[in-house]
Amino acid sequence: MNPALINLLVFAGVVIAIWLAYRFFSSRNPLESRINQQKTITEDILKQLYHVEQSKSSANLDNLAGALQLSRRKIYPVIETMTGSGLINLHDNQIELTEEGRQYALKIIRIHRLWEKYLAERTGHKASEWHHLAEKMEHKISEEEAQKLESFLGNPMFDPHGDPIPSESGEMNKVKWVPLPSFEMNQPCKITHIEDEPGVIYQQILENKLFVGSHVMLLQKDNNEVSFVCEGEEHRFSTIVAANIHVEALSEDEIFEENAVRLSALQYGETAEVIGLSKECRGANRRRLLDLGILPGTKVEVDLKSPLQDPVAYRVRNTSIALRNTLADLILINKS
């Protein structure tokens, strides 16, 4: 056979093979994408229904679509599939979880909260980023991977916001916290949970340097506003914002440090003694401060301030150490 003809046939065969491969993968990728999208919507619906159930409210197609920011046209086929697979029940336009759907929802919540714990303990991501990043990962991690992550984190019982993490079997620790406006006035308590939704309220709480574990005392309250003191600073919040902060009474072995302030509040000429580190101080930051000798009872004073007042050099154990204000905010002191 003519060599030129052979080369032409080989070339044509390669072109056809490439074309067939392209058709195969281009047809498969949209299918995989559609399957993943359906899975994500299904799991988002289950999680939302679980939260509705816990708030003792009810859900229908319209408010569910609104909460998930999806159109009825997009959500309705998924609802039909979920009904057929036994994850949900429909009663007079009300949508409810079955026991199977509830257990599935708890698996997604478990992964979400474990991933938030991982982001808080093992990465440098800001608190305002944890929820959004965890919402992406909750649809990608398998149960086996979640079990490994839980073990890696030391089997935590609560996420960084204070929410209990479901066990592998779907069990959760019961919580005793109440919204801050509902707590007794002039009685010391501690923040045990900060709701991270809606994001605009959560961001406002973060900007006021309020963390899980912080000791607070409610000073005044009415239907519109509450005022309270936290680590040496007085705050005024609307009751709507304050209701996103949950507290509980101090345990018998916890002492309310009435004069406690953050290290960042220390001025030239003042001396102080370290009370301890905020629970919000985690991972590498916590290890660094402990390695630097920031321990209860340590004497500290301002050594030097930069022109922009950040960072600040502090004299600790005859050594000058520079700390950003964001890190100094996590060190609690008593001024001498």
Image (spheres, rainbow, N blue to C red):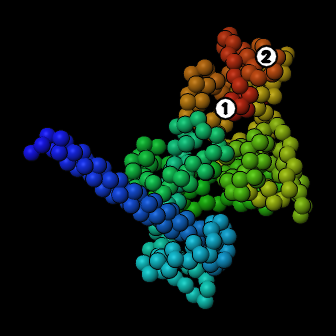
| 208 or 162, nearer to the observer | 208
**On the rendered image, what quadrant is the N terminus found in?**
top left
Residue 169 visible in this rendered orientation of the protein:
no
Q: Is residue 117 left or right of residue 145?
A: right
Where on the picture, by quarter, is residue 326?
top right
Q: Which mark is residue 276?
A: 1
Q: Which mark is residue 306?
A: 2
Residue 28 visible to an observer of this rendering:
yes
In the rendered view of the protein, which quadrant contains the C terminus?
A: top right
Q: CA distance from mark 2 to mark 1?
A: 25 Å
Q: Amino acid under label 1?
A: Gly
Q: Residue at x 50, y 71 (%)?
A: 102
Instruction: Note whether 223 is above or below 158 in the view shown.
Output: below
- Label pair 2/1, CB-CB below 8 angstroms: no
Position of residue 35 relative to residue 72, above or below, is above
**SS class of the residue under badge 1?**
strand
Earlier along the polypeptide chain: callout 2 or callout 1? Answer: 1
Where disc 2 sits, the SS reads: loop
Of residues 44 and 319, the one nearer the viewer is 44
Amino acid of disc 2: Ser
Above or below, 67 relative to 325: below
- Where is residue 132? Give x, y as percent: 61, 51
Q: Residues within 10 Å of mark 2 (few under 14, many from 20)?
A: few
Q: For the residue carrying disc 1, how many other residues have a C-alpha within 10 Å: few (<14), some (14-19), or many (20+)?
A: some
Residue 223 point in image, percent of width and height: 89, 64
Farthest residue to the top: give it.
318
Query: Which residue occupies 82% across, 37% down?
Result: 232
